[in-house]
């Protein structure tokens, strides 16, 4: 059973920890400071759960010459939670960092406006809803540009990295809870789909099924059917 989160998922992340001001070089840290947010150079923690992919995902495929990787606040928080729950032995050492004061409401007005518009227009459908999706897509590309050449007034690669990381963490965490409930995970595909082996018509209870914010579509395939290969 593939579970596919809605494309509106990133909008739910706009209230997460971001740094509205310039990041400062804070170097190596003895511990993660919850009042700060930014980017951190850490060791890749060992993950001994063969039924789930590594919580850092593809980040672990791009270590530096010392076997370390740069991560943002959402992944640091995720690793610390896994330590508290006994799934990791210890939080990784922070060898370097660039941080600033965390802000949980930086994008809240944008999030509330887009959610209200979607709630209204999804009922109308047709051209108004298509226009909303097009304009929202443009707004998101300006808010989280991949390249400086896109001339966005919001050229903050750390913001984009943090939002992508938050989406990845949530996607992984929901799948992990499903595995803990006894479901077998077949594949975890970026922030786009999770494939489980479940009884017919019974998606894992950790997912909210629907078309709204934070909800997913559930597609079921019969035994022996081919699931298109994804970018796992």
Image: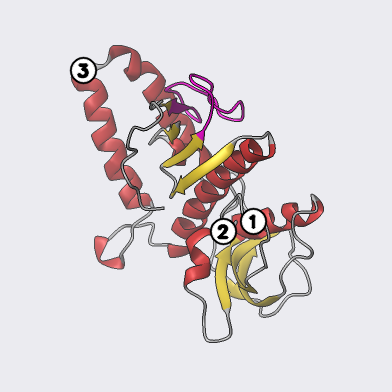
Q: Is 128 part of what is drawn in magenta?
A: no
Residue holding disc 3: 126
Q: Quadrant of the N terminus?
A: top left
- Observer-nearest residue: 169 or 99? 169
Q: State the SS at label 1.
A: loop
- Magenta residues span 197-217
Check the image and name the residue furthest to the top: 123
Q: Which mark is residue 94?
A: none
Q: Where is residue 167 shown, x and y percent of the image?
A: 50, 46
Q: Residues within 10 Å of mark 3 (few under 14, many from 20)?
A: few
Q: Are marks 2 and 1 in contact (CB under 8 Å)?
A: yes
Residue holding disc 1: 102
Q: How is the image coloured?
A: secondary structure
Which is in the foreground here, disc 1 or disc 3? 3
Q: Which is more N-terminal, label 1 or label 2?
A: 2
Q: Which is more N-terminal, label 3 or label 2?
A: 2
Residue holding disc 2: 19
Q: Residue at x 32, y 51 (%)?
A: 142
Q: Residue at x 50, y 36 (%)?
A: 196
Q: Which is more N-terminal, label 3 or label 1?
A: 1
């Amino acid at each position: 059973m593939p579970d596919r989160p809605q494309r509106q998922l990133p909008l739910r992340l706009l209230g997460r920890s971001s740094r509205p001001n310039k990041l400062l070089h804070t170097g190596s840290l003895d511990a993660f400071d919850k009042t700060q947010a930014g980017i951190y150079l850490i060791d890749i923690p060992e993950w001994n759960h063969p039924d789930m992919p590594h919580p850092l995902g593809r980040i672990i495929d791009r270590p530096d010459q010392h076997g370390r990787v740069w991560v943002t606040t959402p992944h640091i928080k995720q690793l610390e939670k896994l330590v508290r729950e006994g799934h990791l032995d210890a939080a990784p050492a922070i060898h370097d960092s660039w941080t600033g004061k965390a802000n949980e409401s930086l994008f809240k007005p944008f999030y509330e406006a887009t959610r209200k518009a979607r709630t209204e227009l999804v009922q109308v459908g047709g051209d108004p809803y298509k226009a909303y999706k097009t304009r929202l897509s443009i707004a998101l590309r300006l808010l989280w540009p991949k390249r400086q050449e896109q001339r966005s007034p919001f050229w903050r690669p750390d913001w984009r990295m943090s939002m992508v990381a938050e989406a990845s963490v949530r996607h992984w965490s929901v799948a992990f809870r499903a595995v803990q409930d006894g479901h077998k995970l077949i594949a975890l595909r970026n922030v786009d789909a999770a494939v489980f082996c479940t009884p017919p018509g019974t998606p894992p209870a950790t997912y909210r099924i629907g078309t709204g914010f934070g909800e997913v579509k559930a597609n079921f395939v019969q035994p022996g059917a081919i699931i298109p290969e994804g970018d796992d």
